[in-house]
Image: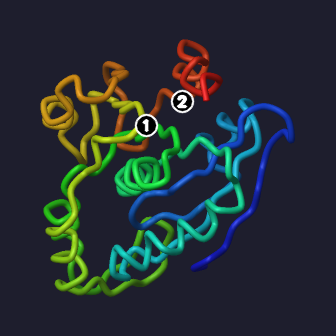
Amino acid sequence: MYGQSRALGKSEGVSIFYCHGWGSHFDPGKNKIRALSKMGSVDGITVDYTLHPQLVFATFTARLKRHPEALVVGTSLGGFFAAWLGAEFGRPFIAINPSITPSTTLRAYVGRGVNHIGDPYELMEDCVMAYDALSFRLDGRGTIVLDMGDEILDAQATRDFIKRRLPIVAFEGGSHRFDHMAELIESRPDLFNAY
């Protein structure tokens, strides 16, 4: 499914480029994507996170260049890349339950396994170690969005790491999948329309 993409949503409104998380894929049928499509057109691409992060970044970059005005939205490891893309290209971004230290969080997946959508993968140690040279980008125009009930990543640690360097919107409860997209859009449409 590497490289698969499909745009969804309205032609008017904001243009959104979506970065999926580890072990997932870009799926226009997912609730998050359908909710985002109410704000405007949503495009994304399925990337292979078992590749070196620079290659993943290059794949996202090539697709993002088709959307010169897009707001970049990403979840989990996709949130890491959303912040990187936003900072690198001066794009606004929203990082949802972002992985702020992929070199640590991906270690649990080193080796062979089956991802969240049932596809086999092999993640090499050197790919995970490549994230050691990368830091979560705090120099962009973005917002961090958290479900404090995230069972995979420590939302409080993310909050402490961000420390007013970027705006944070936090919801009590929820999960790593982020259960508050509809509430986020309803309560904070400015995050999508200000760009």
Density class for disc 1 (Cα within 10 Å; few <14, some 14-19, many ≥20) is many
Q: Secondary structure at mark 1?
A: loop
Pick the residue in front: 111 or 156.
156
Left or right, 36 with respect to 175, comes to: right
| Residue 40 locus on image (x, y percent) | 75, 36
The image shows residue 106, relative to residue 31, as above or below, that is below
Left or right, 110 with respect to 142, comes to: left
Pick the residue in front: 137 or 29.
137
Density class for disc 2 (Cα within 10 Å; few <14, some 14-19, many ≥20) is some
Going by the numbered disc 2, the residue's amino acid type is: Met
Q: For residue 181, which numbered disc appears in the image?
A: 2
Q: Which residue occupies 46% across, 48% down?
A: 86
Residue lying at the far top in this picture: please name it.
Answer: 187
Pick the residue in front: 20 or 119.
20
Q: Say which residue label 1 marks.
A: 178
Work out which quarter of the rendered image holds the C terminus and state it: top right
Going by the numbered disc 1, the residue's amino acid type is: Phe
Pick the residue in front: 19 or 71.
71
Q: Which residue occupies 44% across, 73% down?
A: 56
Q: Which residue occupies 33% across, 22% down?
A: 170
| Quadrant assignment, res 53 | bottom left
Left or right, 118 with respect to 132, comes to: right
* Inter-mark Cα distance, 2 to 1: 7 Å
| Residue 66 locus on image (x, y percent) | 71, 61
The image shows residue 72, relative to residue 52, as above or below, that is above
Left or right, 38 with respect to 23, comes to: right
Residue lying at the far right in this picture: please name it.
Answer: 11
Q: Which residue occupies 69% across, 40% down?
A: 34
- Circle 2/circle 1 CB separation < 8 Å: yes
